[in-house]
């Protein structure tokens, strides 16, 4: 959001339409020509799509309650009600692969398509939510939610811009891509 805010301040007359879908749905819309570019987590894409990494992100667990220990063995999360993004989403897939590698099966109470709702549900105490730490730093700092550090930790991943190399890019889209690259020191 800070990147989009800065872009809008520099280019207030450029229209931005935001479509919120899973990474796979977003890729399909991009391939079909309904989108000029997309911001998604890094996933394997068709050779005609180009991905430019913008930043590293870290998935973490958070809750309204303080964690029971300073660092929690990953397997211990099986005891708690969990709040996760719905299936068939790059963030959930990343988490599921990680959990499977460590033979952990979580007790999922709520599955939803919105990271914002996961954070809000964690704030009111409905369970432990898997969220992107970069996006909840303020809530953690303000002690609205607490991070539950786990061992082993979830591997970092990245988010970036995705666009179709074979299709021409509009001036507005190219301006956005160049701004995002420059704003991120790329």
Image: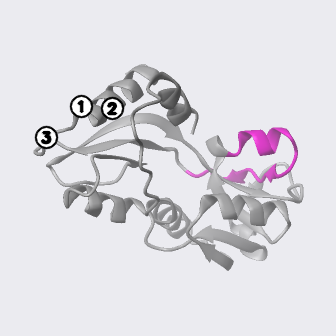
Q: Is residue 38 above or below residue 176?
A: below
Q: At numbered mark 2, what does the secondary structure look like: helix, strand or loop? A: helix
Seen at 75% across and 56% down, the residue is 62
Q: At numbered mark 1, what does the secondary structure look like: helix, strand or loop? A: helix
Seen at 29% across and 33% down, the residue is 172
Name the foreground residue: 186 vs 39. 39
Q: Is residue 156 above or below residue 180?
A: below
Q: Earlier in the sequence, mark 2 or mark 3?
A: 3
Q: Residues within 10 Å of mark 2 (few under 14, many from 20)?
A: some
Q: How many marks?
A: 3
Name the foreground residue: 1 vs 162. 1
Q: What residue is shown with label 3?
A: 168
The quarter of the picture where the C terminus appears is top left
Place residue 114 in its image quadrant.
bottom right
Q: Position of residue 107 (x, y in %)?
A: 69, 79
Q: Position of residue 178 (x, y in %)?
A: 32, 25
Q: What residue is shown with label 1?
A: 171
Q: CA distance from mark 1 to mark 2?
A: 10 Å
Residue 150 forms part of the magenta stretch: yes
Name the foreground residue: 16 vs 163. 16
Q: Are marks 1 and 2 in contact (CB under 8 Å)?
A: no
Per the rendered image, the range of residues in magenta is 136-154
Q: Would residue 15 be found to the left or right of residue 36 on screen?
A: right
Q: What residue is shown with label 2?
A: 177
């Amino acid at each position: 959001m800070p990147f989009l805010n800065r872009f809008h301040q520099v280019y207030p007359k450029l229209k931005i339409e935001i479509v919120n879908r899973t990474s796979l749905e977003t890729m399909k819309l991009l391939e079909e020509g309904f989108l000029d570019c997309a911001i998604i987590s890094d996933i394997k894409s068709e050779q005609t799509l180009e991905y430019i990494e913008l930043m590293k992100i870290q998935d973490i667990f958070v809750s309204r309650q303080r964690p029971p220990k300073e660092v929690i063995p990953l397997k211990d999360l099986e005891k708690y009600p969990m709040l996760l993004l719905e299936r068939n989403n790059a963030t959930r897939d990343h988490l599921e692969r990680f959990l499977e590698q460590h033979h952990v099966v979580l007790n999922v109470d709520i599955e939803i398509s919105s990271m914002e709702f996961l954070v809000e549900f964690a704030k009111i105490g409905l369970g432990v939510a898997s969220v992107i730490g970069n996006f909840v730093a303020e809530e953690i700092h303000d002690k609205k939610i607490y991070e539950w550090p786990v061992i082993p930790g979830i591997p970092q991943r990245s988010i970036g811009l995705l666009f179709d190399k074979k299709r021409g890019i509009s001036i507005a889209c190219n301006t956005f891509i160049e701004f995002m690259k420059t704003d991120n020191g790329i």
